[in-house]
Image: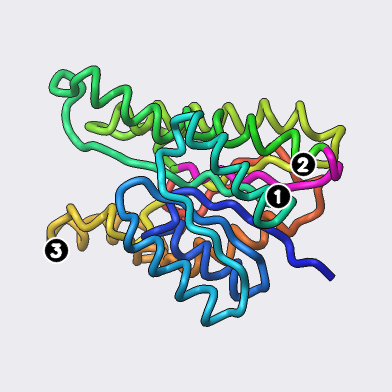
Amino acid sequence: MQSKVAFITGASRGIGRAIAEEFARHGYCLAINCKNSGEALLSYAEELANRYHVTCLPLFGDAGEEPFIIEAFQAIDHKFGRIDVLVNNAGISKIGLLADLSLREWNQILQTNLTSLFCCCKHAIPRMLRSQSGSILNISSVWGTVGASCEVAYSASKGGVNAFTKALAKELAPSHISVNAIAFGVIDTQMNQCFTPEERSQLMEEIPAGRFGAPLEAAQLALTLVEAPSYLTGQVVAMDGGWQ
């Protein structure tokens, strides 16, 4: 039985890295992507292939740029001949007042966090339609629902991810392709290393679970959702320790 193939963006660190390992552990062949850490991506691809005996294709480039995504899917076609799962995880943030945010920074956040979904989904969908099956999972944030002070661009992009998820799910449901999102709270990754120990402690006190989420927990939920029946679609599932 041929292994399923998953394409995961932003997979060199954090949640994306954990998702890649969890999928490899369960026998998925992988195409993994990042745009800033080519050597780390190549090393991780080799590590996953050796540890879990799966094929792992590293794809270095910006998921928000369509020419790169066209090339990426051509490489996936050549290597695997199919795509079963797309995990849109690539994301960046910038903390600061909106008045201090440049247009360049705004556009960069929107391109990485939202335009990348458009590019990847646009080119994954025709391939999934051929098999009348597939799963698209978009990584979102609680800030896409409630908004975060000093993270207006990030919150706007993740709000867009949530609306994108619900709309695309309606388009693809007749073709048995599911589209869901996970709205994460604070997951203990490098993105949150900007907090001081005092800020981390204060933030944990606000979370009913009393701690940050673990990347492994995030990855386990991602696997659960992509392997769920296709009737589960159009959902933005919160995982935040009861915070929001």
Mark 2 or mark 1, which is nearer the start of the sequence? Answer: 1
Secondary structure at badge 2 equals: helix
Amino acid type of the residue tagged 1 in the rendering: Ile
What's drawn in magenta, residue-wise?
130-140
Cα–Cα span, label 1 and label 2: 7 Å
Disc 2 versus disc 3: distance between alpha carbons?
Answer: 45 Å
Q: Is mark 1 in CB contact (under 8 Å) with mark 2?
A: yes
Q: Residue 110 versus residue 244: which sits nearer the camera?
A: 110
- Extreme residue toward the front, this view: 78
Q: Nearer the viewer, mark 2 or mark 3?
A: 2
Residue name at image x 42 percent, y 33 percent? 146
- In the image, residue 231 sits, relative to residue 42, either above or below, namely above
The residue indicated by pointer 3 is: 197
Q: CA distance from mark 3 to mark 1?
A: 42 Å
Q: Secondary structure at mark 3?
A: helix
Relative horizontal placement of residue 236, taking residue 232 as reference (left or right)? left
Within 10 Å of disc 1 (Cα), the crowding (few <14, some 14-19, many 20+) is many
Mark 3: give few (<14), some (14-19) or many (20+) Cα within 10 Å: few
Q: Is residue 239 magenta?
A: no
The numbered mark at residue 83 is 1
